[in-house]
Amino acid sequence: MEIFVYHTPELTPANSLPDCAVVIDVLRATTTIATALNAGAEAVQAFSNIDKLMEVSESWPADLRLRAGERGGAKVPSCDLGNSPLDCTPELMQGRRLFLSTTNGTRALQRVENAQVVITAALINRQSAVNYLIKQQPETVWLLGSGWEGGYSLEDTVCAGAIALALVDAGYTVANDEVIAAIALFAQWQNNLLELFHQSSHGQRLLRLNCHADLKYCAALDTLSILPLQKEPGILVSH
Ligand code: MLT
C-alpha cells in the first residue's frame, strides 16, 4: 500500500485517482458525517452546491430528510441544520437521510467521488479508517484534507498524520513528503489536539461563532467505530 497525503483537493494530481480515497474534514464535515451515521441516519448525501441540495432533497419524503448547510462556519438559513456534529442526535437522525452541503468538505468529496473506494475519516473515527485500510489493502491511498477555500488546514493534516502513522507502523509505504510532515504534526500535538484546534484558523473562526463544544468533540480520538463508505457518488452509508 502506497500512502499519499494531499492537504487540499486543489493539490491533488490532475487526471488521477487512487484506489482508495480517504476524505478528511475534521472541522467539521467528516466528523458530522460519522456522527450522523452513528446516530442512525440512513445515509448522508453530500453536495457542493446548496441549490442542488434543495432540488434533489425536494423529491425525498419530508419526514425522512434533514437538510444541513454551512457556509463560512455558519448555518445556511434555508436549511434545518448547520454543520454541527452535536446536532446529530439519534432522535433526529434515526432513519433519515442527511442532505449536507459545506464550504470545503463536500467539495473534497466531489474531487474524488469517482475513485474505486471512498471513505471519510475524522479524529473521532480514525482507528476505523486505519482498520479498514489494513484489511482491504488498496494499492494506492490518498489521505485528502479539505482545507479552507484552497488553503492548508492544521486539523485535517493532523488527522491525516494520525492515520498515516498507524499505516507506516504497520509497514506500508510513504509515497510523498506530505506524509512525513503530517506524521510530524501529529507526533507533536497528539496529546494536545484541542489546543492545536484553538490555534488553527478555522478553529478560531468556529470559536468566534461560539462553537467551543464542537471543537472539543471533534478533537477526541477514536470515540466512534463507525466507518462512512461511499456507495454511489456523493452518498455515504455506514460500512
Ligand atoms: C467545511 O466544509 O468547510 C467545514 O466542515 C466547515 C464547518 O462547518 O466547520
Image (spheres, grey):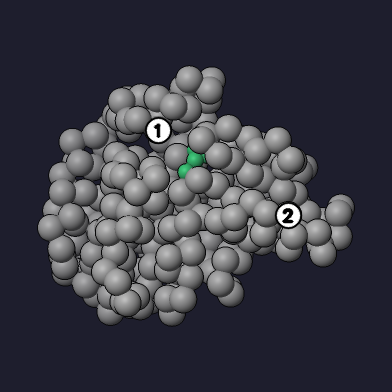
The mark nearer the N terminus, 2 or 1, is 2
Task: Tell me the distance, in whole angstroms, between the alpha carbons under discs 2 and 1.
Answer: 26 Å
**Taking 112 as reference, is 52 above or below it?**
above
Query: Which labelled disc corresponds to residue 54?
Result: 2
Q: Quadrant of the N terminus?
A: bottom left
Residue placed at 48% from the left, 70% from the top?
Answer: 113
Q: Nearer the viewer, residue 196 or 163?
A: 196
Q: Position of residue 186 (x, y in %)?
A: 23, 42
Q: Amino acid at mark 2?
A: Met
Q: Tell me where residue 61 appears, x and y as whole percent.
A: 86, 60
Q: Amino acid at mark 1?
A: His
Identity of the residue drawn at 18% across and 36% down: 188
**Residue 97 location in percent, x, y?**
72, 57
Residue 202, which numbered label? 1
Residue 219 horizontal/vertical position (percent): 41, 35
Name above or below for residue 155 compared with residue 62: above
Asked if ligand 1 lies within 8 A of label 1, the reply is: yes
Residue 71 visible to the viewer: yes
Q: Is residue 132 visible?
A: no
